[in-house]
Image: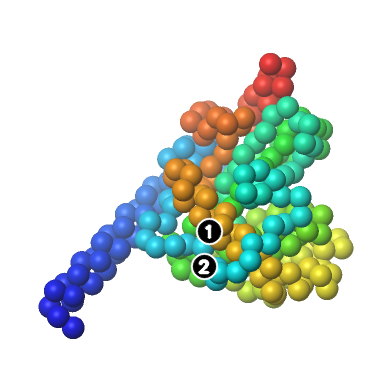
């Protein structure tokens, strides 16, 4: 190998190491904003960018193959999984990553409010998916968990399995969701989900290319990290004082307009 090539590789490694150090420092700072699980801390963290998008190489981890769209997926290129009534006057767009710890914090803080609003027909949620942590931490847990969630959508059990995944999210550096067996075990927490069809969908990675397409859409979207949450197209986390109760009032007011 020429000295020029060695120098080029060394420089690339140094840039990558510097970027990873920068991301780790930023993540520690963001987590420090969460004091005693305060919702305001969650919003401040997310406003600062949540989990930074991977900047070095692809983060989808999926091999090329036919794009199999989950049942009922909507939106551009059918990349959104909807929850709630199509006729709801307000729409919440959520970009998330099942390995993202800040996404879990958001879900834990807002889960009951989101269920209340979707169950009552006041809000529709469109879930979009990224695989940032697979890129930042290496692994395939984001990909595997999202494929399994898409399989749950095929079975009509997405909301329940979505919640189970976040309630059982491993530590960020633990790629436990890469184990399909673990994902199948978690499916047993949802009545009627673990069927032969669901198992085959998970094991075969039926929706892997769809997940990869969603991850690519996230990278091209201009969003800085997960969770990214928009109410009727407006970024929610610009308001660092937002709470579940305030969010509920915003939806009510938006539906009156």
Which residue is more in the foreground, 193 or 108? 193
Residue that appears at 38% across and 56% down: 55
Left or right, 52 with reference to 185: left
Q: Earlier in the sequence, mark 2 or mark 1?
A: 2
Assess whether mark 1 and mark 2 are in contact (beta carbons under 8 angstroms). Answer: yes
Residue that appears at 79% across and 63% down: 189
Q: Quadrant of the C terminus?
A: top right
For marks 2 and 1, give the one nearer the viewer. Answer: 2
Secondary structure at badge 1 equals loop
Give the residue at mark 2: 61
Left or right, 186 with reference to 170: right
- State how far apart marks 2 and 1 are (Cα): 8 Å
Q: Which mark is residue 230?
A: none
x then y, percent, for residue 173 = 49, 66
- Furthest toward the front, the residue is 66
Give neighbour class at mark 2: few <14, some 14-19, many 20+ (Cα, 10 Å): many
Left or right, 25 with reference to 53: left
Give the residue at mark 1: 131
């Amino acid at each position: 190998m020429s000295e020029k090539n060695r120098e080029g590789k060394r420089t690339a490694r140094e840039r990558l190491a510097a970027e990873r150090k920068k991301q780790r420092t930023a993540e520690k700072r963001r987590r420090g904003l969460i004091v005693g699980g305060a919702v305001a801390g969650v919003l401040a963290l997310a406003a600062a960018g949540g989990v930074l998008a991977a900047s070095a190489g692809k983060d989808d981890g999926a091999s090329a193959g036919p794009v199999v769209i989950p049942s009922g997926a909507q939106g551009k290129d059918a990349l959104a999984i909807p929850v709630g009534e199509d006729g709801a006057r307000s729409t919440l767009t959520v970009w998330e990553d099942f390995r993202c710890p800040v996404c879990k914090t958001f879900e834990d803080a807002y889960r009951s409010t989101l269920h209340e609003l979707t169950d009552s027909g006041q809000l529709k949620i469109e879930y979009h998916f990224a695989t940032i942590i697979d890129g930042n931490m290496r692994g395939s847990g984001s990909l595997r968990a999202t494929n399994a969630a898409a399989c749950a959508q095929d079975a009509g059990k997405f909301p329940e399995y979505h919640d189970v995944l976040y309630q059982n999210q491993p530590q960020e550096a633990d790629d436990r969701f890469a184990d399909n067996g673990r994902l199948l075990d978690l499916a047993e927490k949802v009545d009627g989900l673990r069927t032969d069809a669901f198992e085959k969908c998970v094991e075969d990675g039926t929706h892997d290319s769809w997940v990869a397409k969603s991850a690519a859409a996230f990278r091209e979207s201009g969003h800085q990290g997960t969770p990214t949450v928009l109410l009727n197209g407006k970024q929610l986390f610009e308001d660092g004082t937002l709470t579940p109760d305030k969010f509920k009032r915003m939806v009510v007011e938006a539906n009156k307009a």
